[in-house]
Amino acid sequence: MDHAAFPSWPDVAAHLVNVVAGRVPADLVFRGGIWVNVHTRESLPGHDIVVAKGRIACIVPDASHCVGPDTQVVDAKGRYMIPGLCDGHMHIESGMLTPAEFARAVIPHGTTTMFTDPHEIANVLGLNGVRMMHDEALMQPINIFTQMPSCAPSAPGLETTGYEITAEDVAEAMSWPGIIGLGEMMNFPGVAHADPQMLAEIAATQRAGKTVGGHYASPDLGPDFAAYVAGGPADDHEGTCEADAIARVRQGMRSMMRLGSAWYDVEAQITAVTKKGLDPRNFILCTDDCHSGTLVNDGHMNRVVRHAIACGCDPLVALQMATINTATHFGLERELGSLTPGRRADVILTSDLTELPIEQVWARGQLVAKNGSCLVDCPHYDWPDTARQTVHVKQALTRDDFAISAPQGANAVRANVIGVVENQAPTKALQKELIVNDGLVESQGDTCQIALVERHRATGGVTNAFVSGFGYQGRMAMASTVAHDSHHMIVVGTCREQMALAANRLAQVGGGITIFREGEELALVELPIAGLMSDSPAAEVAAKADQMVQAMIQCGCTLNNAYMQHSLLALVVIPELRISDKGLIDVRKFKEIPVFEPLS
């Protein structure tokens, strides 16, 4: 039964009352566990949890009177009974998986609720793509709520997307059963300067009584930040330091602290709670972006909670940040996020609150995972051909498409270079002096070429520039149709021939990620759905992703999760420097800048 059709509390209230009174038997009883109460921040030994119709009826020291001949009794054996974990902000597409396969991957890690923003597919397929993600999400045995994407394009005028999201689209989506709010409002300059469309999207969401997601990616906490908050966003996950977290909660926002595959922002911000003593109920843990390799090998929200604890957070506080805080923020405190009467019976059994081994996972009163294995079916949506044929390149690309000509007569140039920062979403705006050979500027030392290949309308457009920080060596190239947020094709390489090979390979397979070295394909991750996702099992995709990571290492890259850095090189709403189909973009000023500056 999907979560949209799941019986509401009022629908089953009479039955719950009768179960608690002992007039009818329970469906399920957890016996003799330690009840972790995230409302009061207590661990209470010797309690039973009574479940009926997929909801919690009561939690009492002895539920014997609720047990009938057909009641399933689970001996908790003194283990902790904690609420299913909630991810407050994430993008399913970043896992390279469809909602069904993402659910199958995270269920064994104790994630029973996700608040997802499918703005990746919105950039490729528009409102129809969002509907497909929404519909498959509703089919799953866990709770996947969808936020309607707000910004496609993320920075109007600075990039061209496959489709554009309008205020009318947002208003329409607010009536869908699985829509919980508005996705991250990335166009923070637009909100701060009262852009009519951005404010109309926010207004449509607020009138529907739903939550507006934030995304303030600037370090400036002055008037622009204040203006952004006044516009209506209710949370933000772009903070990278303690001051960011404090500024957000002081203004009535929720501070979402993320630990994804490449974003390590919890440690620097959680000190607002552990050292400054701020009220932890306004802090939420999330992942934002996790690729399949992280999900299969390291975990999901259980990984984030463990990390928060390792950073000095009290385990019960960390659990609040991944359960009740999240549910409350989205207006679902009476529906999920705690083990209390009426809530969905999303229960984890674990023997240790610090290490958090996920021994059993129950969702809506059903055993869905045990000791790392998913025990339930995760149904697939029937993705149409229009969602599988989205890489449109005008013609076969050649080395000449990646040529960067120097100014006439120059022997050397000063280039504006995108500087990758390990484990962080922001980049650095660097300038490097590069040598000219035969009128062209090519990769030199740690400075590689980067190209954005238009792939939505087959215009034949290729934007060329430079990037530094990957450490690539030899003749190689890496190409990906995952390129937040416009999702054109991004190619990074040290050799123009290899760049052409990689780009043409992705056009051939319909999207994904590939790495070439010396004419040989070292790795390929096929992502046929919108060029973003695979509907293959997570373990298979993760194995190919692991091969991709190893190929990057073979080519000289030692950055942690460098693929995530690669995928964000076109994200023109996060400072400092990015690439788009319009050119090289200085996100500090939100304007295009030249690849070359005059030599002084």
Image: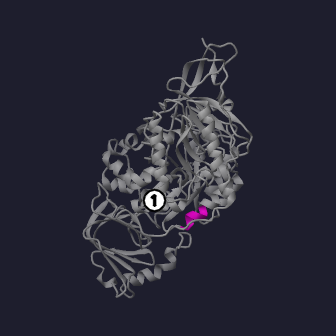
Please tell me how crowded label 1 is: few (under 14), some (14-19), or many (20+) other residues with Cα within 10 Å: many
Q: Is residue 539 magenta?
A: no
Q: Is residue 262 visible?
A: no
Please give the name of the residue rendered at 47% of the width and 52% of the height, measured from the top-left corner.
542
Q: Amino acid at mark 1?
A: Ala
Q: Nearer the viewer, residue 252 or 241?
A: 241
Please provide the residue range marked out in magenta.
Answer: 134-139
Q: Main secondary structure of the magenta part?
A: helix
Element at label 1: helix
Q: Quadrant of residue 361?
A: bottom left
Q: Position of residue 360 (x, y in %)?
A: 35, 67
Left-right relation of 388 to 84: right
Left-right relation of 535 to 552: right
Indicate how the structure is coloured in the image: one colour
Q: Quadrant for the C terminus, please.
A: top right
Give the residue at mark 1: 105
Q: Nearer the viewer, residue 79 or 227?
A: 79
Please give the name of the residue rendered at 50% of the width and 64% of the height, measured from the top-left corner.
143
Q: Position of residue 254 (x, y in %)?
A: 47, 49
Q: Quadrant of residue 422?
A: top left
Q: Position of residue 569 (x, y in %)?
A: 57, 37
How many circles with numbers are drawn on the protein?
A: 1
Q: Position of residue 490 (x, y in %)?
A: 60, 39
Left-right relation of 224 to 298: right
Please give the name of the residue rendered at 63% of the width and 25% of the height, measured from the top-left corner.
595
Q: Residue furthest front?
A: 519
Q: Is residue 367 visible?
A: yes
